Amino acid sequence: MRTLELRIFVTVLVTAALVPGSSRAADFPVNGHQRWDVRGAYALGSESGTSASCPIKLRPSSQCGTSEDQEDCPYHLTLPPLTIQMPKQFRLLEKTMKELQSLKEQVNKLKSGCQECRGARVHQQADQGQAQVQRDAEEVHRVDLSGQDLLTGSSQEERGDGTIPGAQDVTGAGQVPIYGKLTPSPSSLLEMQVKLNRMSTSLRNARSQISALQGRLEGLNLLNMDNVQAMVDQRVENITGVVNKLSSSCNTQCAVQNSPQFILAPRDCSDYNVLKSGVYRVTPDPRNGTFEVFCEMESYGGGWTVIQQRVDGSVSFNRTWAEYKKGFGNLRGEFWLGNDHIHLLAKAKDMVLRIDLEDFEGVREYAKFDEFYVANEFLRYRLSISGYSGTAGNAMSFNKHFNHDHKFFSTPDRDNDMYPSGNCGAYYSSGWWFDACMSANLNGKYYHKRYKGVRNGIFWGTWHNMSSEYYPTNYRQAFKTVRMMIRPKNYAP
């Protein structure tokens, strides 16, 4: 019994020491019908708690009862213009605080019972013959200390001095009177011990849940109004930039003005009023600087900006993505102008494309496309081409299986084609807008005569005698010269 008394006493003291710290760690109201803001809780019916200084509010999402079947009550944290769903553990926090309050009342009762027992402690006597009587008296006192809180009904029979009417008064020579109360049953003591253990476990669980909720609240502190305002300002700035860019674009063709037009920087070869072909500088977009191009001013009305040319095979077109991006070759001989430059030229004005081909038999044909555009590198230089006319045939849109329109640019080191099992650029040793794989490739290898094997040379699938190439043992067609050039659609010679 002494061991049981000591364990109960230590448990009570530890619990009493833990309760205040837990209450300070999570000072939440037990009333589920309160409204929260940054200043604390106030009743829903009180208008004095309303303030326009801070619109942040924390409130239950619905009416919350106190019964066991209504303990799951989610909370809403309002940060205009945001509403955040809080976890259901906020309701569990209120229940935990109620249990803590009940535990504190039990501890206070036990402490008051211990103080009453101190004045009635039995004095030890020297006579060894009375040791048994003294031990019995102490046993009665220990039972009184353990069962005082449970035997509330017996308090009505107690006198003011703590004795019970009819209690045995053992007096005489060398004897000590015995003071005490009714002895509780062992089942009551066991029930109280189980209840204390359950409350102690609930307290530990509550502390761990409070710590977890504090961590979540610290995370929610990041969603303050300054961060939200900065995010909104950034989005507005991005939208404003897009709107300004769209506003600066010309949606319709500008009306013809009678006043003289002064060109500060030619955007392409059509802006030059010259009759001689050669290398000139153009500035399609002032933000991207000026670069040189070859202008064809003597053929087909002039004003053409040449973007590709093959004449003698002196320049290899088996190049990397970076080289096709920047451009390579000699503007007065064989060259590729560069995908970035082609994109800027096609972006500045609505362009038409003309392709001139000549084979080694002296046959010359052309293909013209009224719509031509090349996207930027982010879109992998996607090609948009349509509106065919000419004599060479429309090899750029041969059929549904070989159609180069709306295809991405591929190189031997960058596979963007539609072929699922390999890289068309690596197989045909060139960079081009491959489908899966091609019906045209003007950047293939330059052959000085017909050849056999892989069709990796310059290829135009609708050439007049191309039907003889369908058999792998036959010779492949070779081209002597190829030229691709663009000009504004509304150009007038």
Image (tube, helix red, strand yellow):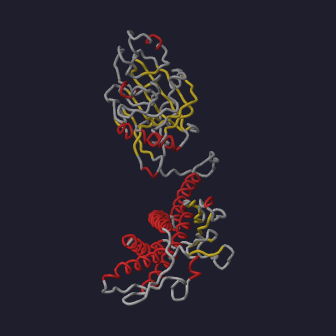
Return the residue nearer the eye: 32 or 202: 202
Q: Residue at x 56, y 50 (%)?
A: 261
Q: How many labels were placed on the picture? A: 0
Can residue 207 be seen here? The reply is: no
Work out which quarter of the rendered image holds the N terminus and state it: bottom left
Which of the 4 image quarters holds residue 328?
top left
Q: Nearer the viewer, residue 292 or 472?
A: 472
In the image, taking residue 248 as reference, residue 472 lies left or right, namely left
Q: Nearer the viewer, residue 399 or 166?
A: 166
Q: Quadrant of residue 310?
A: top left
Residue 402 on image: x %, y %: 50, 23
Task: Look at the picture and state if 372 lies above or below 364.
Answer: below
Give the x, y percent position of residue 76.
Answer: 59, 63
Residue 241 as seen in the image, left or right of residue 128: right
Q: Is residue 233 above or below residue 426?
A: below
Considering only vertical position in the picture, is 479 above or below 92?
A: above
When asked about the image quadrant of residue 133, the answer is bottom left
Q: Position of residue 32 (x, y in %)?
A: 62, 68
Whether residue 37 is visible, yes or no, is yes
Which quadrant: the C terminus? top right
Q: Looking at this view, is 219 or 252 the one in front?
A: 219
**Residue 186: percent from the left, percent from the top?**
47, 67
